[in-house]
Structures are given as C-alpha cells and as structure tokens.
Amino acid sequence: MPRLTTALRSAVLSAAALLAVTAAPPQARAAAGPEPKAPSGFVALRDVAPTILQDIRYHTAHNFTGDRIDGYRAPMCILTEPAAKALRAAQHKLLRKGYTLKVYDCYRPQRAVDQFVRWAEDLGDVRMKEEFYPRVEKDRLFEDGYIAEKSGHSRGSTVDLTVVRLPALPTRPYVPGEPLVPCYAPQDERFPDNSADMGTGYDCFDTLSHTEDPRITPEQRANRQLLKSALEEQGFANLPEEWWHFTHRPELFPDTYFDFPVSRRSLTPGH
C-alpha cells in the first residue's frame, strides 16, 4: 500500500477520531452534562393553538446560512405561555376574516444565535446571498443590525410569522443547491410560500423588509397591516425593520437568554 501523504494521514486520523466519538456509548456522550430544560412557563404552540400553521425554517437548510441550525431538534414552535395564548386570540379573529397565522420561528436557542455569529464572521460563505441578502455585503451584517450576538427570540416571547389566506395551499420543500431568486423579487418569482404577499420573503436582509417601507404596493401594505393590527391588539409589538418580527409584552422572561433545544423533551411535563 503506498505511503499516505501527511495531509491524507491527518484526514484519516481526524475521521477515526470522529468515528470514535460518535460510536461512544450513550453514557460516555452524556458525560458532558445533561441538556438544559425549559422552565415552567414555556409551551408548545401546537398544544395551545393547533390551527396556526408552522413552517420552522431553521429546522431546514432554507435560511440565510444554507445549513440546518443548531438546537432545532424538531420543527416545532415553543413560546412562553402568555405569547402562545395571545397568538391564539389573534388567530381566532383572523380565521373569521378568512386567514390563518403561520409561524417561521419562535423560541430560538442561544446556540443557534452563536451559529449565526460564526456564519457572519466567515466572509467566504455566501452560498445563500443571492436570495437572502443580495444588496448587502456580508461584512456589513453586524453593522447594519441583521446579525447580533443576542436575540430576543431566546427569551421566548418573540415570534416571526405571517398570514396565509384560506384555504392554505401546500408549498414545496426547498431543495439544497436549487437556483436562488432575490427575496425582494415579485412573489410569483421568489421561492414559493403560501403567505399573503408581504413584499419580500421571510428573513430578507433588505430595507424593503421595513414594515412601513413606502416602496411596497398597496396590496402588500394592506397585508402587512392585517398582520400587524391583529397582533398589536393582543399585546405584540413589531420590530420596524422586519415586518415578520413581533414580541409579546410584557415578556415573561425579559432578561434571560435560554439555550434549551427546540424539542418536546425540553418542555416540563404537562407543557
């Protein structure tokens, strides 16, 4: 057998080390310590408001990083109980108007935010630029406020969401590597989403995502206002830079950034 080169030998040793870790018995892997759990006060939105649609993007690779995000063990929405109940109240009113809410992201573990930060610091990784930030250079994402080391989502009362006209049509899954279209393109050109036309897609790093941006059409403005008014009536406040971002106030945990995984097992029994 030919002698291994230094680089190849290093790669083989690294692979062997990784295999040893993944093959280790569960008790050895658990030695790092148990996963954090959610305190009482967090609930699964599905248990409180089962008619609200869920499209948890960070459980998939269809997001601005191009990778599934750390800590999203299940495609589910977890929120503080007051926020979940407020969404249920908003949903009841919207259903009577022929719409449903759809959530993209809810509670977000700190480990997910940390992954966003690492991604933003890697200026060479621009796989998803053409869709999510085509008009913003990656080295400006921190300065322009699109990425930060802390997120209100980690406190549990912030949610990213939209409205969908009923009956809600199915949407196809994202296929990694498929051609990308700018998130501010006309709705029939950008990635398909059964959401009402909001002028941009979700997580569009662009000033057109500002809730009151004057360049959107009257229909898009009406759809944004439908979402905003329905949530404001239930105690949510919108982040002006993102039409999809709302925080329920007063927050149940205003000063705590949690890191438990998005998983049913993270919740206390009965929640």
Image (spheres, rainbow, N blue to C red):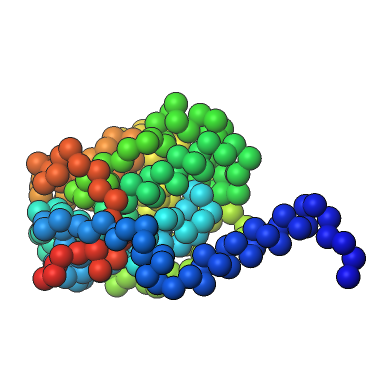
Tell me: 155 left or right of 17. left
Front-lying residue, 156 or 173: 156
Judging depth in this view, the residue of 210 and 260 nearest the camera is 260
Residue extending farthest to the right is 2
Can you say which quadrant of the picture contains the C terminus?
Answer: bottom left
Q: Position of residue 264 (x, y in %)?
A: 25, 69
Residue 105 on image: x %, y %:
32, 55
Q: Nearer the viewer, residue 128 or 148?
A: 148
Residue 262 shown left or right of residue 142 in the figure: left
Residue 52 appears at what percent x and percent y? 23, 66
Q: Residue at the location (44% across, 73% down)?
A: 25
Q: Residue at x 15, y 39 (%)?
A: 254
Residue 164 visible here: no
| Residue 120 visible from this viewpoint | yes
Q: In which quarter of the image is the N terminus?
A: bottom right
Q: Is residue 265 left or right of residue 112?
A: left
Left or right of residue 4: residue 75: left
Between 9 and 269, the one nearer to me in the picture: 9
